[in-house]
Amino acid sequence: MGLKRDVSLAAGLRYRGPAGYLTFILHRIGGLGMGIFITMHILASFFGGRFGGTLNGIYEHWAFQVFIYFCVLFHAINGLRITILDLWPKLLDYQTEAIWIEWAVFIPLYLIAVYVIVRVGAGG
Amino acid sequence: MEITVKIFRYNPEKDQRGNYVTYKVEAHENDRVLDVLEYIKGKVDGTLSFRRSCAHGVCGSDAMRINGRNMLACKTLVRDTGANITVEPILGLPIKKDLISDMEPFFDNYKKMLPYFINEDPIPENGRERLQSQEERARFDETTKCILCACCTTSCPSYWANGEYYGPAAIVSAHRFIFDSRDQAADERLNILAETDGIARCHTAYNCTEACPREIKVTKAIGEVKMAMITGKLD
């Protein structure tokens, strides 16, 4: 008798983890986003024609590019942080600082790119 | 002050699923959440079930999710939670009743780490102890503090996703013996941790370190075991 082990996605996301947990979630979203992008790209090339053109239209849209650039850039920078901390565990004492540095690198790079994408995409 | 306490309730004899019951009680800001639960059980609703033993942060019995984060109820003050408190069982383990989780899967993983001293050499002739330097002892001091409350393991998203993963607490207990200069089974433990459900499932989410009521740097300990596995060095 009793409730079986069950951790829903909603329950997991409701957990009030530290800053590292937010980066963990965004890292997964980034990976998922890249997976969706690559899948769409392959399907567009494989099928071509009208269907391929529609897919092309989606992932070449500036709004999608703003999303996918977030995925790629965040996944890369966060992955680099995790790799460095994995290779030098003593640096894990400075995990919080590492996350601040990560955001300090990510935010300006991302905002500059978003500015350029939106300006070009919106025809400015 | 009056506080509102929302508690996860589940009675295996009556309920198909859990639900939340809200209690309004008087509490002092210096009361611990455990005091509030004791008050509710003693004065308001005697059917409420939860584990507690020492009530002083040593035994680790009363690990629960308080306002969405794993904590020991006996180490959490009302002034830190605020007047609205939500209390739920820890995630990732079966629930027996109310706030009581089935800890067997957690201890099964713990036992896999051979959490005991292994040394086949005969006991030294000149004494009853196997001596080690202060530096050698300090190498694993951090991980001796673990009280097996499961706060770390049940805060780990990798463990939520896969209950077969040994989890942070088991790796911490392995660390305690792997880096003990007197122990001789480090390779055996590292081989166990190299298995599919072993240390590779740690993705450095860092929830474990934040959740640990003993302030063990759990992620760092896991990182040290990862490096020991890669390099074969125990320094």
Image (spheres, rainbow, N blue to C red):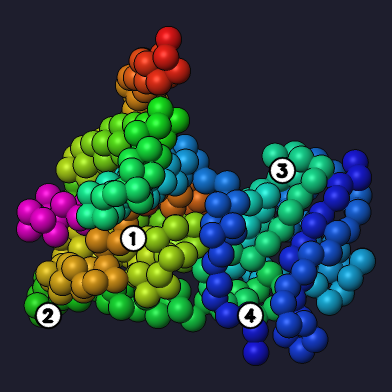
Taking the image as shown, residue B188 lies to the left or right of residue B113, namely left
- Kind of residue sitting beneath label 4: Leu
Q: Is residue B168 magenta?
A: no
Labels 4, 2: one chain: no
Residue identifier under label 3: B81
- Determine if marks 2 and 3 fall on one subunit: yes
Q: Amino acid at mark 1?
A: Val
Asked whether the residues under marks 2 and 1 belong to the same chain, the reply is yes
- Asked if one can make out residue B72 in the rendered structure from this viewpoint, the answer is no
- The answer to the question of whether label 4 and label 2 lie on touching residues, with beta carbons closer than 8 A, is no
Q: Upstream in the sequence, badge 2 or badge 1?
A: 2
| Nearer-N-terminus badge (3/1) | 3
Q: What residue span does the magenta drawing correspond to?
A: B219-235
Judged from the image, the secondary structure of the residue bearing numbered disc 3 is helix
Q: Between residue A30 and residue B177, name the one nearer to us.
A: A30
Q: Position of residue A79 (x, y in %)?
A: 27, 40
Secondary structure under tag 2 reads loop
Residue at image location 40% in from the left, 40% down from the top: A58
As drawn, B13 above or below A74: below
Q: Tell me the residue at 54%/60% (across/down).
A: A9
Q: Position of residue A109 (x, y in %)?
A: 33, 19
Q: Chain of mark 3?
A: B
Dominant secondary structure, magenta: helix
Spatial CA distance of label 4 from label 2 is 43 Å
